[in-house]
Image (tube, coloured by chain):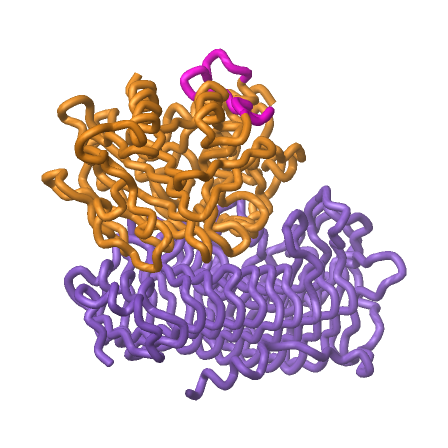
Amino acid sequence: MIARGLLLAGLLALGAAASAGGAPPPVPVVSAITGPAMPATLAEFGFFADPRAQLPAAGVIPYRLNTPLYSDGAEKLRFLYLPPGTEARFADDGLPALPVGTALIKTFAFGEGAARRLVETRVLLHRAEGWVALPYVWDEGQSEARLALAGARVPVTTPEGRAISYRVPNRNQCKECHGLNGAVVPIGPKARNLSAAWLAPLVAAGKVNTVPAGADTLPRWEDRATAPVAAAARAYLDVNCAHCHRPGAAASNSGLDLRWEQQDLHALGVMKRPVAAGRGAGAFEFDIVPGHPERSILVHRMRSEEPGVAMPELGKATADAEGTALIERWISAL
Amino acid sequence: MKHYLLAAPLLALALPASAKTLNVAAGPDAQTRLQEALILAEPGDEVVLGAGRFVLIDGISLDVDRVTVRGAGMDATVLDFTGQRDAGEGFRVTSDGVTLRDFAVENPKGDGIKSKGADDIVYHRIRVTWTNGPAASNGAYGIYPVESAGVLIDAVTVSGASDAGIYVGQSRAITVRNSVAEANVAGIEIENSRGALVERNFVTRNTGGILVFDLPGLPVMGGGNVLVRDNLVVANTTPNFAPPGNIVAGVRRGTGILVMANDGVWVEHNTLYDNPTAPIMVVAYTQGFDDARYNPYPRNVTIGANRVDRGGTDPQLDGAAQLLAAFGGALPPVLWDGLAQPGATALRVEPGLAGWSLNLTEQGKGLGGGNPGPLNVPTPDRTAMLTGVGAPAALEARLHP
């Protein structure tokens, strides 16, 4: 519901930018996106009309992913900004071509309603020399978010009621997940993980070239109980693991390739022995043993919260119980 | 120039500064100050770590080319990861032309220092230690360059790794020299790599000393052209403490130098004493595999002149008692499994160096089931000496700036 409300607000804002009377509505500062500096505060980008409420500025479009990355249960508010007169160009089920000046903005929050607390906002800026990833941490009073190149730790309470030390990744760690063949790239907004219902009005508004055939390929996370288990599980692995476990990325040396499009079972881990898992392998010999999640290294590492064993290595302190249950269901049925 | 991190980062970014020094002292907030220095450094800069103990609770990383990270000595500057809470390694390097020197990493939860896709890297006088000694709960690799071209590891010390102390994987143009690998499962491991020179290392109290092998199913395979010479490989008698799922969990306690599934490995002028399963072992990949690109056999492995004791006096092998009785109380120093690629020469051994063969007939079935007997292989072919091993000369120059 929150996501839908924001979606509408964003589309309204999109239309309002040109027609509002009186004081001009806030708009993003393109030079902050494309310039060489690392702005010290999030406010300098002008992405939000009301930052604390996460109400976007004109032209900043909220979106959601069908299947999201698990981040200790954080609520995530995602936004796309395209410079005036430009569009995102989709060709297949993958990432669109996004023009220089594009910004992807993701805020992480914990708590509901009035108690909601913004923890961090990560921005991915498309500059002439490539994408730049920067982390911003919100202050205690929620008045501003400041650049935290070295990352931070923030005490939060997860939706399950656990008090944890939430880790804001440092700038290099941004690249650890967003790195592909040496360059920083977006991960989330692949056509397969976006809904046609979101894309269609953006096509009408001239911000997206087309609703690609690959849209909506991944099932929605909230539909996982009724979606085909293989599709739900493979979507989960694609979104949560494959940014590293794929050729050209941070865990390429493992030989494990968990991308949605990978069809080779061995590359997906089925009866594949670990290479450099070290003690992460625990007592087990294979990444995935069909029918036996309890003997599969993949599940063992998803369940762990111990650094050196736990997977993913970054971006979460707690195990994802629901995600693990889904993967167990899939392996049981293999 | 002194660099004030908190006041000057934006200014520094705007200026095309010449190489500078960023000093980082131990003490409160070392995590943030050190990580900021590693992010704000520019190519050519030196990040200088003061003496003392840097208490770090998260992994640190470097992604800027041609940066030197220098401490006050491997005993004086310690990056202490005992309380580490996230990341898969203590220190991660992903940029080219980096030099790491004169500091220690203690008790990382995963690997010690991992450099991935980091070409032309130098590790000099680095220490990585798990201070509680050998334990399955220790991290996997101490020093871990992978998918890199140009690796020079000189005068490092690694102990306690639950996999390999010094592990070089899927890389080429490599030197591992003058280093100490002690009380790890594997002391030094060269895996799926080409053009490695492993020389003048002291390798002791590991389960296995020096391992050279190729594994299937990896992006980079076809390992070989490896020269292992002038190493002191002694008393590798620590019981295997690797987690069971691990490839090195299969290494027998008391293995000196192991060559498995590799092409062109030359082992010469090493001193091997008290490696009671096998001072030198040459075998095919022991497990089944499903990878058409992979060659599981040793090819063109030469065991030249080495100083060796009488061999396997306490072998961790099936039927050890009968084997010892049959060979007069000690298994000859060179152990071959007897498997070779059809039409290729697996192994050549210096005359006068005794050996034995398991005489296995089938690859992928482990080390049991053969009909052991004396070794009968050709003598070394001196015209086939290896060339082109070792790190590029430009890396050597960085040892003495």
User: How many circles with numbers are drawn on the protein?
Assistant: 0
Q: Is residue A316 left or right of residue A181?
A: left
The answer to whether B3 is drawn above or below residue A243 in the figure is below
Q: Position of residue B39 (x, y in %)?
A: 33, 62
The answer to whether B271 is drawn above or below residue A84 in the figure is below
Q: Residue furthest left?
A: A141
The answer to whether A212 is drawn above or below residue A279 in the figure is above
Which chain is assigned orange?
A: A
Q: Is residue A225 magenta?
A: yes
Q: Is residue A220 left or right of residue B295?
A: left
Q: Which residues are magenta?
A: A211-228
| Residue B366 in view of the camera | yes
Q: Quadrant of the N terminus of chain A?
A: top left
Q: Position of residue B300 (x, y in %)?
A: 78, 69
Q: Quadrant of the C terminus of chain A?
A: top right
Q: Is residue B303 magenta?
A: no
- At x 54%, y 82%, the residue is B394
Which chain is assigned purple?
A: B
Q: Is residue B180 left or right of residue B196?
A: left
- At x 64%, y 59%, the residue is B192
Closer-to-camera residue (B336/B318): B336
Closer-to-camera residue (B121/B347): B121
Closer-to-camera residue (A328/A268): A268
Q: Position of residue B118 (x, y in %)?
A: 50, 64
Q: Residue furthest right?
A: B343
